[in-house]
Amino acid sequence: MDYSKFLDDSFEPKDWINAAFRANKGTGAANDQYATTLVMKLQLLVQEVNSVIEETSREVVSNLPRVLRDVETIKQEAALLQDQMKHIKQDVQKVEQDTSKSMQALLQLDTIKSRMEQTAEALQQADQWTVLSSEIEDVIQSGDADLLTAKLIAMQQSLRLLASVPDYDDRCQHLEALKNRLESLVSPNIITGLTSGSQESTRHYVEMFTSIHRFEQMQRYYEHFHKSLLSKSWAEHTQVPDKTLPQSLALFYDTVMSTFHSQMSWCAGVFDEPISIVCQMLAVSLESLEKEISSSIVQHVDNQDNCLQFVMQLKQVTDRFAQTLEMALLDRLQSQENYSACVMPLARVVYEPYLPFFRDYSKLESQSILSELDKVEMEDRRYIDTSISKLSASVSQVFKVSRGVIDRCSLLTGGVGYLAIADIYNSFFSNYATEVKRILVNLGEKFRSQPEGQADLDSWTMFSYALQTIQISGEIIAEIEELDETVVGDILLTTDKLSVQAATPLSDIRVIYQLSSEQILLLEQLRETASEKQSVLPVSLKVLRSLSEHAHKLAFESVFSQIDKHLHGLSESEVWMSESAGGALTTDLPTFSLSPQEYITQIGQYIMTLPQYLDPFTTETNAGDNSEALSITLAVKYGRLPYSKLEKDVEHLDSIWLESVSRATMHTYCDEILRISEITPHATKQLIVDIDYFKNVLDDIGLDPIDQLVSISELLKASPQLYANASQNIPKPLSTTIRTMRRIEN
């Protein structure tokens, strides 16, 4: 039976009992009998525990006096120990006071001894310097470089101990002059060793120069040797007559990579840090060629039709070289912790020839895309239908050009050019918008006067052409909004590189483009704008969205021009001075005997016909999610029709157009009526009939007449006797004008 469970802090009686009975199932004994046995065992256990507790208690009581005596004894011994520690402390303080003068004397003696030893050593070294100086000329004459090196090392050690002598600077200059003579002595052998590729010989001279603190000079010998080889290689590649500059540059970079791999293996047996040495050698070599490479690029760029595209080709060659070099470095840099210092100068010098183009990217890109824009044919100066077709086709061509900016910005500037992309696009789309507006103005002029040699077009054909320009403006808006989203996404991808640690400086855009802290800050701000889903091309969006308003204006003028023709000169018509119809006196005839004049019936029929010509336009709008529907929706969203007060709902486009044309007709009609100088009673009735007809037309299309037209109708219908009462709630200038027209006396 397991009694250990009773000691658990989380002991649960129910669980223990259930576990005991589950264990009994295997024995076959009855539960009642098992329970009786279990209770008896527990009672025995309780008795045993009680006995143990009683025995332990008796032992504790019997041992307690002895424990108390031991505690008292320990207390007394602790007090005695404390007393003795105080006496010892006093003794130590007394010894320190008695011997302090003796200790100071000993310290002074030790200081004197040390100074005497230093003086003796300095005298010995001074004597050694004198001896070495007298021997050095004979060693130089013998030409034994190793012995000369040993003498110079000894002189270095002597000079280190003579730092306080008055002629220390003169001795330093003398030692440097001797090192120069050693260098002159061994320099031919160094060049021979580098030329022959002798690791043993070169390693010997590396150790020699290191021992006399001239390692940097030995490194310069190595760099100068390979710099001359690479310079010769560049000259050979660029002088090949049938090779383009990108091909020559690629071949030169192949030579550089071959040099890198061969020198990494060779330097491993010569220098202690071969990667640093080889990277520095390549950086120095490429830096010496920077002016020649830049000059070649500029010379070839001047002969190119598209200089930006040519620079991109060259940079792609350089990018491939940098990636290959970076991969080669990563394979060898795994065991090196601080490699950025040696790779940084190399990364800078590789892209140095392109820095002028990086800095002038905005100007070069603007020139490039504006020249491409000039090549896009947008207009036919003779035929309207062809002109609109070319304008429509130009949208995809223009935005293909604009999307090329994103690719070039990423490839040429690594995305840094996004700082100027808004200005580039603003200039480009401003020119494009100006050209589109000019074409719309030309179309408007062609609508008003048909081009020579072209059959006359009816007003509805011109209106359908004008509606197409609205759709084209919508296509432009859809394209610029999509372009803006693309630029935002690319900006986020590019600026992510700023927050991610590059594998080496060769892929760090801050290094290869030599970004200033201000440029980095501007890129971070641009990222914040893009990450908040804000537009990065607000000016371009505004300029191109305004084209919809110009297209709507063109379409409105094309459809309203026919109404304007009917109303033009209406105020000067002779009918307003007529006293009869057909020669009979009709002054007393009722108005219902008169019929509306032709001008107003033609206007009414024209307005009633408008929806059926808008039907193809509205059908495309309601067709679903196709591009035409999206274009028209965007055009309506950013366009504006004169006199329209309805919300811009593409589902009720016909209602918007009817309202705009009808309200424009009412305003123009009212203006013409108010310009009538005098009207006869008969003509007044005729005008009332005309106005009532027009009001019926408005009622048929679900529109109310404007207040001014209603007021004119009321004043025309009022008899001279009741005119004053009828004009009470009407603006005085209007009532006065109608009174004068009707010759009603006050």
Image (cartoon, rainbow, N blue to C red):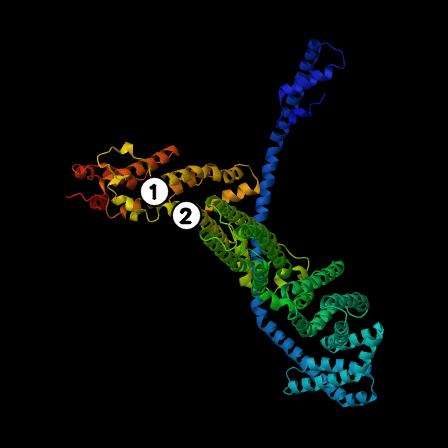
Q: Is residue 454 left or right of residue 308?
A: left
Foreground label between 1 and 2: 2
User: According to the image, label 1 marks what residue?
Assistant: 666
Q: Residue at x 78, y 83 (%)?
A: 151
User: According to the image, label 2 marks what residue?
Assistant: 561
7 in relation to 406, above or below: above
Which image quarter is the C terminus in?
top left
Q: Quadrant of residue 144?
A: bottom right
In this rendered view, identify the residue nearer to me: 698 or 220: 698
Q: Quadrant of residue 363?
A: bottom right
In this rendered view, identify the residue nearer to me: 59 or 141: 141
Q: Position of residue 272 (x, y in %)?
A: 77, 68
Which image quarter is the N terminus in?
top right
Q: How would you rate the neighbour count of disc 2 (Cα within 10 Å): few for under 14, some for 14-19, many for 20 or more?
A: some
Q: Please, what is the three-letter code of the amino acid marked with disc 2?
A: Ser
Q: Is residue 159 left or right of residue 459?
A: right
> Secondary structure beneath disc 1?
helix
Q: How many marks?
A: 2
Residue at the extreme front of the image, as rendered: 583
Mark positioned earlier in the residue sequence (1 or 2):
2
308 in relation to 213, above or below: above
In this rendered view, identify the residue nearer to me: 443 or 294: 443
In this rendered view, identify the residue nearer to me: 542 or 143: 542
Q: Is residue 339 visible?
A: no
